[in-house]
Image (cartoon, helix red, strand yellow):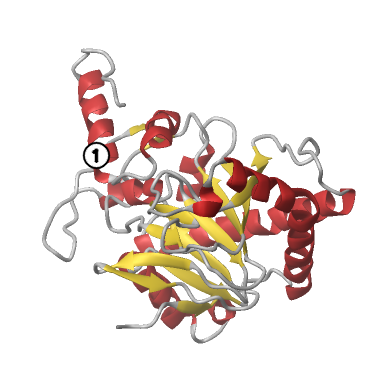
Amino acid sequence: MESFPIINLEKLNGEDRAITMEQIKDACENWGFFECVNHGISHELLDKVEKMTKEHYKKCMEARFKESIKNRGLDSLRSEVNDVDWESTFYLKHLPVSNISDVPDLDDDYRTLMKEFAGKIEKLSEKLLDLLCENLGLEKGYLKKVFYGSKSPTFGTKVSNYPPCPKPDLVKGLRAHTDAGGIILLFQDDKVSGLQLLKDGDWVDVPPVKHSIVVNLGDQLEVITNGKYKSVEHRVISQTDGEGRMSLASFYNPGSDSVIFPAPELIGKELENGKKENYPSFVFEDYMKLYSAVKFQAKEPRFEAMKAMETAVANNVGPLATA
């Protein structure tokens, strides 16, 4: 099997730019995932984020997680469970309004650090969106403009820890799903693996590479590209050994009132398999209402539900139930 795509973004600035752009294009079309090195975010900053995130978990979240596991009987599993994840998380909102000052139990230094980290990730997200525009033949800034809606994109970071699990065969760290939103940038533990994506029917490990940023495409980019790029199912496997796995997934998503639709330049173009996709138009908030109820189910029925809603509105018969 071909190896997981790891792309050196520094080469965009030299004679290897065309080759690097082709690598990004291939990764988007055939993987839905790739890993960036030399992405412009300093190693020193990433090392601080990793250190302070792990310290915060130990200090403020580990005991609560263990108590929660005990209360739910997950410490004595005898059969596989499919309705729970072996993870400890909290969520930081950055746009349109930040909640970093309001999240409890964060040290002031950690709050300041995470604000700086979010700023760097936001800039990298927008840079990557413009690279996607270039490969797709779209005007520079097109994707960012669609994501902005009337105010701003929705941007936040899910901070996760996956503690050691005594029975990883019975419970996943995070169940298989595609991401609902736009472009997702993941800073993950470089010592503990666990993230896998589904490719050609097989689960493939996403290699932990020190100081890298993993990029994956969400459902909205599949719609906007009219199926040229696909969101890909992925999961986190629980591990028995070590200190557990850390990950910070930053979601650069459309604003709640953003209207999502296939880019006109990409409508009617045949894919390599000869098919012509026909994706729906919808408001992002409507999609999220449906997604929240069926996150761990296949994405295709979600697209069909949005298409049915679009048809109903066009025919003036009112909205359809989507869940």
Query: Which residue type does callout 1 highlight?
Result: Pro
**Residue found 57% across the figure and 53% down from its top:** 87
Which part of the image, by quadrant, shows the C terminus?
top left
Secondary structure under badge 1?
Answer: helix
- For the N terminus, the quadrant is bottom left
Residue 113 image position (x, y, % from top left): 80, 56
* Residue bearing mark 1: 301
| Residue farthest left in this picture | 274
Residue at the spot 42% in from the left edge and 82% down from the top edge: 19
Q: Nearer the viewer, residue 149 or 265?
A: 149
Residue 155 shown left or right of residue 136 in the figure: right
Q: Is residue 292 above or below residue 216?
A: above
Q: Height in image: 293 above or below 253?
A: above
Image position of 114 (left or right of 290): right
Residue 157 at least partly seen: no
Q: Is residue 177 above or below residue 254?
A: below
Count of numbered circles in the view: 1
